[in-house]
């Protein structure tokens, strides 16, 4: 996507993500936005990265939410200020 060229503002892209943000995947018509949701979707779809038992899945969800809430923001802040 060419952000300076406003590719995120096109009607085609906005149909996939009304917020005009990346990342977005379109997996044979299944459109998923938000990095955490995309990772969880791909983990479950692979059949290898997400435990099939409820307790195991809960641990994956726990650490994904932890990463998104406590790691992503400081890392992103450091990256943007560099």
Image (cartoon, helix red, strand yellow):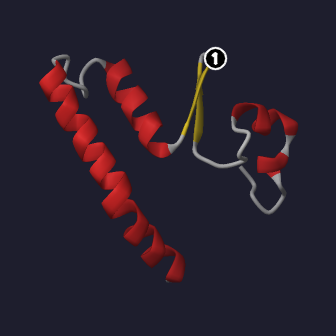
Between 17 and 2, which is closer to the camera in this rendering?
17
Could you tell me which residue is drawn at 82 percent across and 48 percent down? 9
The percent position of residue 38, horizontal first and vertical second, equals: 46, 35
Quick check: 50 left or right of 20?
left
Between 2 and 33, which is closer to the camera in this rendering?
33
Quick check: 82 left or right of 26?
left
Between 13 and 1, which is closer to the camera in this rendering?
13
Residue at numbered disc 1 = 29
Could you tell me which residue is drawn at 45 percent across and 36 percent down? 37
Could you tell me which residue is drawn at 28 percent across and 52 percent down? 66
Between 25 and 71, which is closer to the camera in this rendering?
71
Res 16 quadrant in image: top right
Could you tell me which residue is drawn at 60 percent across and 16 percent down? 28
Quick check: 29 left or right of 69?
right
Vertical placement of residue 72 versus 79, above or below:
above
Number of labelled discs? 1
Res 61 quadrant in image: top left
The percent position of residue 70, horizontal first and vertical second, equals: 32, 61
The percent position of residue 74, horizontal first and vertical second, equals: 38, 71
Furthest-bottom residue in this view: 82
Question: Crowding at label 1, few (<14), some or many (≥20) Cα neighbours within 10 Å?
Answer: few
Vertical placement of residue 44 versus 35, above or below:
above
Give the SS element for disc 1. Answer: loop
Vertical placement of residue 22 versus 33, above or below:
below
Vertical placement of residue 43 versus 30, above or below:
below
Quick check: 21 left or right of 51?
right
Res 25 quadrant in image: top right
The percent position of residue 62, horizontal first and vertical second, equals: 23, 42
């Amino acid at each position: 996507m060419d952000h300076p060229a406003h590719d995120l503002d096109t009607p085609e892209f906005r149909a996939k993500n009304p917020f005009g943000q990346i990342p977005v995947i379109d997996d044979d018509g299944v459109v998923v936005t938000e990095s955490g949701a995309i990772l969880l979707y791909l983990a479950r779809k692979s059949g290898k990265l997400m435990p099939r038992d409820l307790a195991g899945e809960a641990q994956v969800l726990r650490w994904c939410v932890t990463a998104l809430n406590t790691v992503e923001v400081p890392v992103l802040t450091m990256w943007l200020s560099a």
